[in-house]
Image (spheres, rainbow, N blue to C red):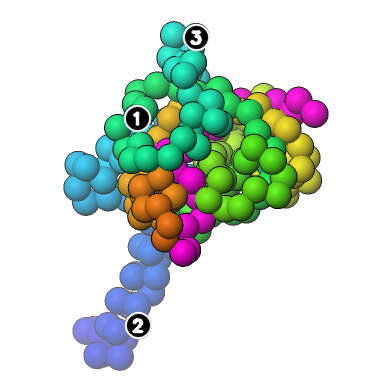
Amino acid sequence: MPLTKRQRLVFILVLGAGLLSAGLFLLTHHCPASGFAFTKERRDFHRLKNRMALPQTLDFDEGVTLASLLQPGDDSARWSASRAARIEGYVVAVAAARTELANCYCGRDTHIHIAPRPNAPPQEHVVLETTPRMESWARHQGWDWSEETLKRELLGRWVRFEGWLFFDLHHADESENAAPGTPFNWRATAWEVHPVTKIEVLR
């Protein structure tokens, strides 16, 4: 017996909901390192954010320090995203980032802002980010890198971080080095340590 128009509509809606649920489940548990992207440029950008390899000794650029990251001037070509960094500073803010295509809109990075002193203005903040992938990796090492724990254990402390250098071009026009004097700059530089691969509280 053929389906009525109403039955066909219900069938299509149920099928669509099922496919959407299955797709969301797969993205939540199997989001690729390239995230959700339509262009090669965007996929490569996401892969840099989602790196899982731990930097080795020769990967570190010893010239990268908090002080050098804060040096004024156009810094877009100052460092290389193929290198890693080891930097120290006061943790002045910890907050969950917005959902984004790099994580298939499932899971969030955590922003960690460091500065040379606790009361530094936003224009002297350097942004570091943990990612859902590295948070999961840390959990398997017995470390809790959840936003709540990082906020509780890092805020107001002097902390050493290791991780990969990353230039977040989407925030360049909100950084003091690239757009000096812009009233709403909320960071010193578009360069980040992203992802963070090691956290050590020093004092």
Residue pictured at 33% horizontal, 40% vertical: 74
Q: Nearer the viewer, residue 75 or 42?
A: 75
Give, as a single range, the part of the protein colored magenta: 183-203
Report the residue at 54% width, 30% height from top: 67
In the rendered structure, which amino acid carries the disc numbered 1? Arg
Q: Is residue 99 left or right of residue 40?
A: right
Callout 3: SS: helix
Read off the residue under disc 3: 57
Callout 1 touching callout 3 (CB < 8 Å): no
Q: 150 or 43, which lies in front?
A: 150
Residue identifier under label 2: 10
Three-letter residue code for mark 3: Thr
Near mark 2 (Cα within 10 A), the count class, few <14, some 14-19 or many ≥20, is few
Element under disc 2? helix
- Name the front one of labels 2 and 3: 3
Q: Residue furthest top?
A: 58
Which amino acid type is marked by label 2? Val
Name which of mark 2 and mark 1 comes first in the sequence: 2
Along the horizontal axis of the image, is 111 left or right of 83?
right
Q: How many marks?
A: 3
Decide if residue 76 is on the left or right side of residue 198.
Answer: left
- On screen, residue 5 above or below 84: below
The residue labelled by disc 1 is 78
